[in-house]
Structure formats: structure tokens, C-alpha cells
Amino acid sequence: MFTKKMVGVVFLFILVSLLVACSNSSSGGDVEDLTIPENPEDITGDITVWAWALEANYLEKDVLPAFQKKYPNVNVTVEHIGVDQVYQKVSAGLSSGGSGLPDVVQVENNRIHSFTDEFPDAFTNLSALGYDEHEDRFSEAKISGLKDQDGNIIAAPRDLGPVGVIYRVDIFEEAGVDPSTINTWDDYIEAGKKVVDHTGKYFLGTDGDGLLRIMMQQQGSYYFDEEGNLDITSAAGENAARVLQEMKDNNLITYTNNWDGQVAAMKNGEVATQPGAVWWSGTMLEQMPELAGKWDMFKLPAFEEGGTRASNDGGSALAIPSSSENKVAAYVFAEFATTDVDSQIKALTNRGLFPALLEAYEEPIFSDNQEYFNNQPFFKKFADTVENIPPVNHDGAELEVRSVMGSEIEAFLLEDKPAIEMLEDGEKQAAQQTGKETTE
């Protein structure tokens, strides 16, 4: 027979077991101990999401209504916060052991490791919660930058920025340039000479080091090697410098000072091309509607015939801070926002955000001709390059190095510093500033 004491022990055991089960399905704790209930209605809780600008609007207005139909017992609050403020608050929160952080936060690919280098356990291991099953639904270039040193996915891929050359159709026609003949950067330069001679304007403009990074990545290289050493003066860097130098020597390129200057140069016909990411389309539609039908796109020129004609510039992901008290609800929200096809299409059509999810490219919007872009399947042209984008190392020191190289680009264009010296001086300054070694 059970004594009162034994009954009490059994009751206590059952109560603790129930509490643990509830914890595993709806709250924080060690991620390895958590499980995702099969029934979406069994997932409950309140979560907070930090995001900025277009992504915040996407998550709140496009994702949330559909998400709540599937997960009716999860309450989501999307807080619209400026990008700089997000990063300041995340840094402060991680420094204080996770205090004050949200359950989900938008983080750019090139920022992920700036946090994890200093705080290795900053973000939840999504692989442990099952996100690995989605890995093949994204390009290697996107997913590889969202892994920790052990190969675990620590942020769910949301959008990206495949690159091409956006060009003025009318100016090319007037100058007698056929974009289909531009296969290499040498071809691009020759076309640029014709356009500049015809118009007296520039062929392209830049407000920083973006084009240099694009050119290096398309060669499978970047500011850092796989071990995180500085690799700016690599063969890929020197190839890019040669092309940039030739552009400058032929008066094809102008320094546009800042973002607004670059937009104005495109809007006012001061440049005929913009080698850049697909997200430029949103700015163009909004700020230069009078140029509808006059823009189109061709693939990024290769460095040699048959070479890679793909690269990336930008893109973000959704991470779950390890301090989240409701990781299960946070996970299913991040998973839904990044893998639901209908939501990805809304991101593109409503916000101009290009999805990272590969299967989204099979939707009609990608094959549809876009009136603004010369009645061509503008988005499909970019989508066709995604799987060829080479993966590179977005080291935690990237923003510091980009700042250094941005100043060097300015010196190259405005102070006549040779492009090779720009690379060499930039690498030396970056090494001094970051304390990183250079590739031998």
C-alpha cells in the first residue's frame, strides 16, 4: 500500500515531468532538449521580433497574417527599429548576457560573425531544431555564411542580392552597343568607350567598395580566405584592380560620393549602367518612375571567356538569440517566414525583397515580363545566376575592412592612387586596424 509520503513523491514526480514537457515544447532552455510539436496549435507563447524598413513590413504585413492562421496560439509583435539601432541593441544585449534581446532578430549575412566571433553562443543552433532539412532549398553561397564553425545553421536565410549589370536600353541603342556581345569585363570596357564617346557622360558610378567586392566574389575570392586571414591582394583582387584601373584610365567611371549621389547619377542619365544587386529595382521603381521601359539587365561580365558571371551583394537572415525564453515559437516563426513560398513572393512583389528560397523562382512572377524593365523577365534573369554565386567568407571583421577599402576606392578615383597600391595599402591598414594576419 502507498503511504501518504509515497503518494506525495509520485505526485511531485508527475508534476515535474509535466513542467519539463511544457518547457520542451513552448519555452527556452537547452536547445538540444526542445522538440517541435507536430500539431501547430500545441505551440503557444508570445514572441518579439526586431527588424527594419522593408523586412519589418514584410514580417508584419505579409508573413504574420498567414502565420497566425497556421499557429493561432503564438502571439507575435514585430518592432520596427532602425538598422543601426538593432545592431547597437544586440551588441549591448549580448554584452550583458542576453538581457533585453528579442526572440527573433533580423541580421545581415555580413554581420552574423561580427557577433559570433565575440559571443560564440549568441544565437540558437537552428540545426538542432530541424532547420537542416531546409538546407538544400537555398544556394550554397547563402547558407554557408549562416553556419558556425561546427557547420550548424545559426540563422534562417531570408533574402539575398544576386548581381547583374542594369543598363539603359535607349542609350545602348543610340550608341550602337548590343548587350548580348558583352561577355567579359574587357567587352564591357569596350562597350563603355562607345557609350562615353556617344554621350559625353560616364558608363558607371560608384560610391564605395561594392564593385570591388562583387568582382572578387565572382572569382570565388573575397577580403578574407577560409581561415579568416586578409586576402585583399590575392590574384582575384589584382584582376579586379586591373579592370577598375582600365575603367578609370578611359574615363568610364565616376565617384558618386554616397547613396543619394549614385541614385541621382542613374536618374539623371549621368551613367548608363549600374553593376549591382537586384534590390536596386525597388529604388528605381520608387525614385525614377519616369524611366520606365528604359532599363534592362545582362549578366555580370566574366574575367575570361566562360568564367563565372554571378556574384552577390547584400541579404539578411533571421536569428534567434540564445537568451530567448520561447525558442520553439521563435523557431516556427523564423522557419515559416523563410520557407513559405507564398510569403517569399509577397516579399518580392510588395517590398522588392528578392527571396533566397530557390523554389520561389519557379513561381510565375519570375517568368513574367516586367513593364518597367523593357518588358523582359527581369527577376528571372537574376534568379538564373543564384546557384552559380561562389560562397565566400564574411568574416566578423568585414565591416571594418569595408570601411578601409571604401576610403581607398575614394583615393583611387579622386586622388589618382594606382589601383594596385589601393589594394596593398588597404590590406596593410586593414591588418593594423583588425589585428588580422594576411594570407601567405
Image (spheres, rainbow, N blue to C red):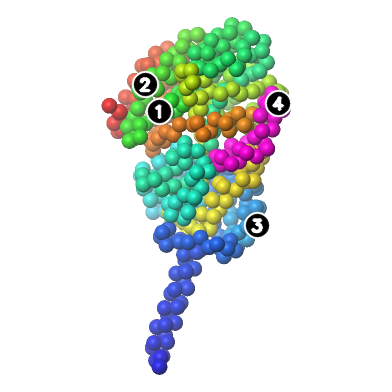
Neighbours of disc 1 within 10 Å: few (<14), some (14-19), many (20+)? many
**Cα distance in 3D space between marks 2 and 4:** 39 Å
Q: Dots 2 and 1: beta carbons under 8 Å?
A: yes
Of residues 388 and 188, the one nearer the viewer is 388
Q: In the rendered structure, which disc, 2 or 1, sits on the residue that comes first in sequence?
A: 1
Tell me which amino acid carries mark 2: Ala
The magenta span reads: 351-377
N-terminal of the pair, mark 2 or mark 4, is 2
Residue at image mark 3: 69
Identify the residue at image location x=43%, y=25%: 219
Where in the figure is residue 395, as x and y percent of width and height?
A: 39, 36
- Distance Cα–Cα, label 4 vs label 1: 35 Å
For the residues carrying marks 4 and 3, which lies nearer the camera in this image?
Answer: 4
Question: Dot 3, crowdedness within 10 Å: few (<14), some or many (≥20)?
Answer: few
> What is the total number of numbered labels drawn onto the structure image?
4
| Mark 2 lies on residue | 235
- Residue under circle 1? 221
Dot 1 falls on a residue whose secondary structure is: loop
Q: CA distance from mark 2 to mark 1?
A: 9 Å
Label 3 vs 2, first from the N-terminus: 3
Closer-to-camera residue (350/390):
390
